[in-house]
Structures are given as structure tokens and as C-alpha cells.
Amino acid sequence: MAKTAVASRRIVLLLVVTSLALMTIDVRGFGPIDSARSTALSVTAPFRSFVGRVVSPVGDTWNGAVHYNDLQLENDRLRAEVARLEGELARLPDVEADLEALMAATDLEFAAGLSQVTARVVSDRRTGIERIVEINRGSVAGIRAGMPVVVGNGLAGFVAQVIDDDRSVIRLITDSRASVGVVGVDTGQTGVASGDGSNSELPLDPLLRIENLTEGERFETTALSLRYPPDIPVGVLVKRADDAAVYLQPFVDFERLGFVTVLLTEDQS
Amino acid sequence: MVLTAASLIQTGLLDQLLILDRVRVDLLLIVLLGIGFSADTPTAVLLGFTTGLVVDLFRFGPFGLHALLFCLAAWMLVLAKERMLQSGGLFRTVQGAIASILVTAATWVGAAVFGQNSPPFTNTTLIDLLWVGLIGAVLIHQAERVGRWMIHDALTRLPQTDMVRTQ
């Protein structure tokens, strides 16, 4: 009996050493072991596939029986998820429009060096008399009345009133009470563009003769302006056929104001 | 042949049928239990070693890890069988449950020691182990028959009396 026990222990010891040796060899990346594994898996693949096909109904039944409540919960969850996604899908055009407006408002190629606050237009009312545009930033963000308001492609207006900590009213340059001094980029002609409340073209009152102005010339804010920093794009010159009047077609699309950027000009003063 | 068939069933079927989405029926572990409770020490450790090698062949941990664990487990099972009080079928059922739990836990520990991802010890770990024990308890008698058939041994009757085997 004792001899048998000793022999058994020797066998166990031998197998343990063999196992450890195999593990060491495998950890060091012994190719034949990987080959053996690959061979075993590939040789048995057809059998495993066959078994899988044969017993898959069993598996489905098993899973259905064991996970019936889970499946019901999952079903409910998926229905809710579908409803939520449908809602999001319906909102997708709005989200895309918001993103586009935000990018347009913040992607400034001018006013470098000025502190800026990006704000969302939270209210845009047309009373029939005026257009009241409110943004969701106020005194807490450092906004003061008179600060210029821009979007990515040009001047939009200025802050007419700071209502409270988180709300302000801006006045668009198309407002009949707004005017802006402009200068032509090519000719250096100056003038004053005033709003007429139409939200479209700004009548331009040039300081020189209309005949000297070129159709299509870009106009920017002038350095002589007290309210606006210079070189902010305002619009492009449009002439009437009879040369009786000239207008600036604003770069800003005032019908699609989602976000605006307020230039904190007083901070730099 | 039994090991091959068990491996095919394990990899083709049982690995996909999880209890509570976590607990797997480990057929080769059950076979090992059958071997351990049926064979003498040299046969059991050799078959345990071979069974472990088959397991290693179909997994991607260190090759030889399961061979080592199953070899030692088979040895322990034989020792337990030879030294513990034998009291019939119910006792063997309990033995099967405990052995399943211990070998499974040892496999997890061994896997962790040798750098594999063993299951994290959470609140559900004990529940999982209880399930493993239940499976071992249910299948131990069938596993013993398979084990006896595997080793072509004449060991067809287990001691049915209360007695302590002595060396």
C-alpha cells in the first residue's frame, strides 16, 4: 500500500512538472501548441456546427423559457427606446439647424483679440413694430448695453438692453433705430447704413457720390465708429437700376438667428 | 472518445446555454468528478491530466493550466474517496456538489494566479458557486458511470457501509 502511495505521488509530481513545463513553453510562444489548438478547433468545427444546428432549437427554447421575463422587459425597453429614437429623429432637423447656427455664430474671422460670449437666441418676437430678439446671456457674462453682436459672417447688431443676469435684448442693424458707419473694402468709400425695419437690405447713405460706388463691393465697419470695432463685415453693395439709391445686402441671415456672439468691447477698453 | 464527445458538446452547446446568464455547465469538470470518484490514484491523475489537456486545447489560456488543476483535483478526489466516510448515494451527491465547487473555485484561483481573467468576486459569486454545486450534485452519479466506463474498470460497486478506510 505504501509503495502504491509513493508511486502515485511520483506520478502526480511528474504530471505537475509536465503541466508547469507546458505552461512555461506556451507562455514563451511555442508554435506547435498554437498549431494544435488551431487544428483542434478547425477539425471539430464541423461537428460543433452540426451540434449547434441540431440543438439550436433546444437552446432557443431554453433561453426563451429561462429568460421569458427578461425578454418581456427587454421588449418593453426596446419599445420605449424606439419611441425615444423616433422623437429624437423628429427633432434631428432642429438639432442640425442649431448646430449650424452655433457654428455660424462662433466661427469668427474678425474681431480677433476681443473677448466673446456666445449666446442662444431664446426669443425672437416681431410685434409688428419692431423685432425683439432676446438672448440667454446677461450681466453675469459681462454683457453691457451697447456691445456689438455678431455671427460668423458679419455684424448682427448690438446689445440694446441687459435685462438681468442671464438675459439681454439685442437690436439688429436692420432695426429702424439702428445705424452703422461703414467703409468699402475696395474703394475706401464711407457711409452710414441704417435699418428700415425690413430685415433685408440696409439703405446706405454714402458720403460721396453714388456714381463712385461699385456694385458688389464689400462694406465693413469703419474705424471711426464709436460703437463697433473696425473691420466687421456688414454687407455687400447693391445698386438700384436708376442709381437713385444704394443699399447694403447684409451678410447675416436675420431670418435664421439661432446663436449670436457678443463682443465684450468694454473689457478691452 | 468520451473526452472528445464531451468537448464537442461543451463547446457546441453548453457554452451557449448559461444559467442566469452566468453559470455554465462544465461537462468536462463533471467527467473529472466521475473519474476521481471511480479510479485509483494513478489512473485518476492521468485521466485528469488528459482531461485538462483537452480543456486547454479548446481554450486560450496558458496551455497546461487545466491539466495541472484537473490532475491535482483528481488526486484530491481519490484521496477524499479513499479516506472519507462513505455512506451511499446521498453522501456521494454531497461530495459531488462540494467537489464541483472546490474545483471550480480552484480553477478561478489558478486562472488568476497564472494571469487569466477569472470572474470577479461579487455578490453573485457565491450564488454562481451554489449553482455549480447543484449541477455537480445532480450529475455526479451519471458522471461516475461514465468514469467507470472510461477506465474499463471492474469497480462497479462502491462501499455501502459506514466505515473508514485505512491505509
Image (cartoon, grey):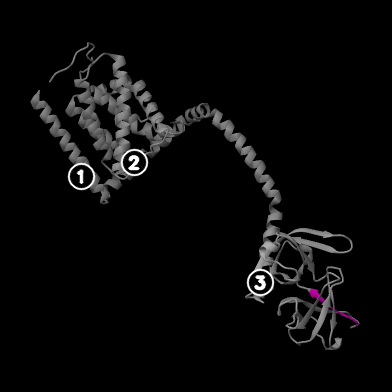
Quarter where residue A185 is shown? bottom right
How many labels, in total? 3
Q: Position of residue A61 (x, y in %)?
A: 51, 27
The amino acid sitting under disc 2 is Arg
Residue A108 marker: 3
Front position among marks 2 and 3: 3
Q: CA distance from mark 2 to mark 1?
A: 18 Å
The quadrant in which residue B121 appears is top left
Q: Position of residue B139 (x, y in %)?
A: 35, 22
Magenta stretch secondary structure, dominant: strand
Q: Secondary structure at mark 1?
A: helix
Position of A134 with respect to A46 (left or right) is right
Is residue A165 shown to the viewer in this render?
yes
Residue stretch rendered in magenta on the structure:
A244-249
Residue at the spot x=22%, y=19% of the render?
B84
Please report contact status of discs 3 and 1: CB closer than 8 Å, yes or no: no
Which residue position is annotated with label 1? A21
Query: For this rendering, which residue is in front, B75 or B7?
Result: B75
Determine crowd level at label 1: few under 14, some 14-19, many 20+ residues with C-alpha closer than 10 A. Answer: some
Quote the CA–CA distance across marks 3 and 1: 68 Å
Q: Residue at image x 27%, y 40%?
A: B65
| Placement of B160 over or under A109, stated as above or below | above
Whole-number angstrom distance, CA of label 2 to CA of label 3:
58 Å
User: For the residue marked with disc 3, what is the amino acid?
Assistant: Leu
